[in-house]
Image (cartoon, rainbow, N blue to C red):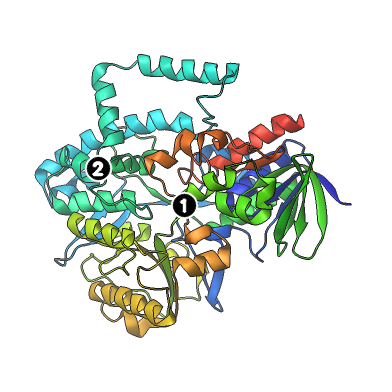
Amino acid sequence: MERHDAIIIGGGLNGLTAAAYLARSGARVLLLERNAALGGADASYEIVPGFTIPRYSLGTSTLPARIVSELDLARHGLRFLRVDGGVSLLEDGGYIASYRDGAIHRRELARHSLKDADGWTRFRRDMLRGAQQLRPLLAGATGDPTRRSFSTLRRLLKTASRWGEKDVGELHDLTRLWTLSCADFLDDYFRSDAVKARLASDALAGTSLGPRAPTGARHLLGAFIDETAGASGGAPARVLAIGGPAAIARALGAAVEAHGGMIRTEAEVTDVLLREGGARGVVLANGEEIQASAILSDLDLKRTFLALFPWSALPDGFVERVGRFRMRGVSAKINIALDSAPEFQAVPEGCPALLGGMRLATTLDKMDRASDDWRDGIPPRAPLIDMLVPTLADPTLAPHGRHVLSVAVHYVPETLHDGVWTGERRDELTDLVVERIAEASPGIRDRIVALETLTPPDIESEVGITGGDLSHGETTLDQMFFNRPSPALAGYETPIRNLYLCSQSVHPGPLGVGNAGANAAALVASFLGKRG
């Protein structure tokens, strides 16, 4: 029977990252992916021949700089392009853009409010401070703070020491950031409703929180995690992989194989082999059995335990705890092939911020109502819409002169209050979104070569994520850090000996895709006695 040191179930970016680190450590690694393409939710495909687009995600996924460097992904062909942060197309026919250059960005804010141009420096300074505190937490396990061990004690003492060094003012600012809503927090810096809506929608897109939900302000930190410039800088850059997110998957796959690891696609795992309370291997859909000393799952928490194990084999009460972890789809995806570049009348021709994407701007009030509709299972009436034309930065993704348009539609419920997503309802959502796009880009209907819409149930069916939840679990504060997915599972180990989690269902979730895979790999490498 075939045997490896480690088997990774799932070829998303976290699973690939874990496989690459483990192969680099000297472990005999096998990665198994059920679909034909690697990348999971970030996999690309051709909507029509020659037009390549990320099928499920917007197309802005990247990896933390430390992972790119440590795995030497540039050697495997990975290249990134840093672009300005995008444009919000306002309802009054205007626009607001985000620029990396501090002077240009302040000038842009001043078009809407002189006070907001001044407030930006304070806001950026406080975001950088918050990101500095958050960054170390992402690159390591949090663990269960109630577990009695020397490692837990050391971690708690280190945390206490770090917080004890802060003055009262800094502690006050951090408390506000982690407890206030986006709307309340932004009120202290900005006056323009358009500016506040731009920042709030950027932070909350793809989450289950509205702009007035408590603890939502912390999502503002996400864009600043990898920022290196000081408070005088502009808006955080958007980093795009040349070739789209699929290029990241290809580079990670090449890194796995360069260190002797193996990758198999169209190899669906249906069961985890158990022996004496521990995981000893996997069973594929074709009945093939493969053994390993360690099993890592890049599947979401519910798919891992509720689909790969007989429930009777799990500890008492564990199935119920897994069931309580909230996973609900919040975004739909529309993929469009165009025969020419879309034009947005509100934005000056050649505006560089367009490379970072477009948002059909909304107001804080409309965002709040949209999030309420999502919670009530009502089809979105005024959804938050993000768009990216990846071919503006990378023309190789479509035939010469043609383009692809990637559209993420947020606050789309997985389950409707009065039924299910039918073809008719999917068409109604498509018509609503295309009409909104046409208001900002007249004539775009005539440019459409092909179009498809995927609702959360479609995403679940095709890529295997429970509820179509691309974050692998809601990112409310009670499901983050040592509570992700629960204190007992926060350190990547599970009650099943030799089984580890490495997906976004565990810390740090979607904050820096790849971190969960890297952190879990370090733990497993230690277990296997490899060099880390």
Using the image, tell me which numbered label, if any, was put on residue 181.
2
User: How many marks overall?
Assistant: 2
| In this rendering, position of residue 82 left or right of residue 269 | left
Please tell me whether mark 2 sits on a helix, a strand or a loop: loop
* Amino acid marked by disc 1: Ser
* Amino acid marked by disc 2: Ser
Q: Nearer the viewer, residue 66 or 180?
A: 180
Position of residue 216 measured from the top left corner of the image (x, y, whole percent): 30, 43
Q: Residue at x 17, y 66 (%)?
A: 91
Residue 97 picture quarter: bottom left
Position of residue 389 measured from the top left corner of the image (x, y, whole percent): 40, 66
Q: Nearer the viewer, residue 100 or 359?
A: 359
Looking at marks 1 and 2 on the same chain, the residue that comes earlier in the sequence is marked by 2
Q: Residue at x 68, y 49 (%)?
A: 312
Circle 2 crowding by C-alpha within 10 Å: few under 14, some 14–19, many from 20: many
Q: Residue at x 67, y 62 (%)?
A: 34
The answer, for residue 98, to whether it is visible in the render is no
Please tell me whether mark 1 sits on a helix, a strand or a loop: loop
Q: Nearer the viewer, residue 147 or 191?
A: 147
In the image, residue 397 sits, relative to residue 154, either above or below, namely: below
Look at the image and tell me in which quarter the C terminus lies.
Answer: top right
- Residue occupying the far bottom of the picture: 446
- Residue occupying the far right of the picture: 1
Circle 1 crowding by C-alpha within 10 Å: few under 14, some 14–19, many from 20: many
Position of residue 418 measured from the top left corner of the image (x, y, whole percent): 35, 72
Q: Residue at x 33, y 39 (%)?
A: 218
Q: Nearer the viewer, residue 271 or 435?
A: 271
**Residue at the spot of label 1:** 471
